[in-house]
Image (cartoon, helix red, strand yellow):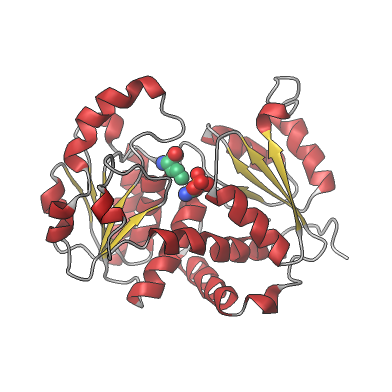
């Protein structure tokens, strides 16, 4: 049985066929209106969400399935009355697929160990694979290819989205540059970097870490940033983070260095004046709402792929 835990586990061909299917779903959604008929998705949330919550629910409903929003704070698990193993073993008896958004990645891995239905990572502190698969769809839609492109990421790089980009870009034949402060707390986790470098070497592309935004942007095809205050970062860190991360803000001067056809991406939620200026996110090069839309299409493809590889079909008619 397959799960979506991190993009480290998914090979280039699997990702490519997933993108192809998502593109087909996007073009002709009505062809998939019964693809999830009688299938039930349970969505466990320990953190806030707009895009993940709504796009998964809409995706399941548009394909004839049903989605249950399960707020972890109202569960026996959240109240400390039940453990993860029992929770997912019970859910496995009711539903067909689980999507979970959690703080600790290890807890998602624990869910996977005990679940007898597919589990999708809807974001942990460590990785956000659904986001980056949707982003690859956005990039391929706009640029017509992935191979040979250079993506430059700016800001907090000890970050779930950055880690997923580091797993995915070299695998898909893309160069990746990270522009972040030199302090270890803003750097990608060393094991992720090592994996990215190994894949990059194998595929003849590059992984670079730079501590200067202007040089990182030079000639880039994609300029990407994410929140300086991810959901798991305590509010009291705000002032210190603004001080450390301001030199890595995506502004007009940074965009000026990128390729003239460069696109600007942010997984959202975004704060204008922080990780990017308003003129960048609201400007002509910004594709942030295409990114948000593509979460819907890619997640439909992810759910169908995992359901097809599930070891048991609980509520299938
Ligand atoms: N990009 C993303 O995952 O957004 P939400 O936190 O709103 O789900
Ligand atoms: N890095 C961000 C992504 C939000 C979708 C966070 O974890 O909050």
Residue projecting furthest to the right? 317
Residue 307 visible in rendering: no
Query: In the image, 130: left or right of 113?
Result: left
Residue 33 visible in rendering: yes
Query: In the image, 5: left or right of 96?
Result: left
Residue 6 drawn above or below residue 238: below
What residue sits 55% from the left and 33% below the top? 106
Query: In the image, 244: left or right of 107?
Result: left
Which quadrant holds the C terminus? bottom right
Quarter where residue 285 is shown? bottom left
Q: Nearer the viewer, residue 225 or 277?
A: 277
Residue 137 drawn above or below residue 191: below
What residue sits 13% from the left and 60% below the top? 256
- Percent x, y of residue 169: 35, 59
Q: Nearer the viewer, residue 287 or 133?
A: 287
What residue sits 72% from the left and 72% below the top? 33
Query: In the image, 90: left or right of 274?
Result: right
Residue 107 drawn above or below residue 299: above
- Percent x, y of residue 103: 53, 32
Q: Nearer the viewer, residue 126 or 256?
A: 256
Q: Nearer the viewer, residue 267 or 137?
A: 267
Which quadrant holds the N terminus? bottom right
- Percent x, y of residue 177: 23, 53
- Percent x, y of residue 90: 81, 38
What residue sits 12% from the left and 50% below the top? 214
């Amino acid at each position: 049985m397959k799960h979506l835990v991190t993009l480290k586990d998914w090979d280039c061909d699997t990702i490519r066929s997933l993108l192809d299917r998502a593109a087909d779903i996007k073009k002709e959604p009505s062809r998939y209106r019964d693809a999830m008929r009688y299938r039930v998705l349970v969505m466990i949330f320990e953190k806030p969400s707009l895009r993940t919550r709504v796009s998964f629910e809409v995706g399941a409903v548009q394909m004839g399935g049903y989605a249950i929003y399960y707020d972890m704070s109202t569960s026996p698990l959240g109240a400390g009355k039940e453990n993860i193993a029992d929770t997912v073993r019970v859910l496995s008896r009711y539903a067909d697929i689980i999507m979970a958004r959690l703080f600790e990645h290890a807890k998602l891995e624990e869910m996977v160990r005990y679940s007898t239905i597919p589990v999708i990572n809807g974001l942990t502190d460590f990785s956000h694979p659904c986001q980056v698969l949707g982003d690859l769809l956005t990039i391929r839609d706009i640029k017509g290819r992935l191979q040979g492109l250079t993506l430059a990421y700016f800001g907090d790089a000890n970050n779930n989205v950055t880690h997923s980009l580091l797993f995915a870009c070299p695998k898909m034949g893309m160069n990746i540059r990270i522009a972040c402060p030199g302090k270890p707390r803003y750097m990608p986790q060393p094991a992720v970097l090592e994996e990215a470098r190994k894949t990059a070497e194998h595929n003849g592309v590059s992984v670079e870490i730079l501590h200067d935004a202007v040089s990182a942007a030079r000639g880039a095809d994609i300029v990407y940033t994410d929140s300086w205050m991810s959901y798991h970062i305590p509010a009291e860190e705000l002032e210190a983070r603004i001080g450390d991360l301001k030199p890595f803000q995506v502004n007009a001067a940074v965009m000026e260095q990128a390729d003239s056809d460069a696109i600007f991406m942010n997984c959202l939620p975004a704060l204008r004046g922080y990780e990017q200026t308003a003129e960048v996110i609201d400007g002509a090069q910004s594709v942030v709402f295409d990114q948000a839309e593509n979460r819907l299409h890619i997640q439909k493809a992810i759910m169908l792929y995992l359901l097809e590889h599930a070891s048991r079909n609980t509520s299938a008619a």
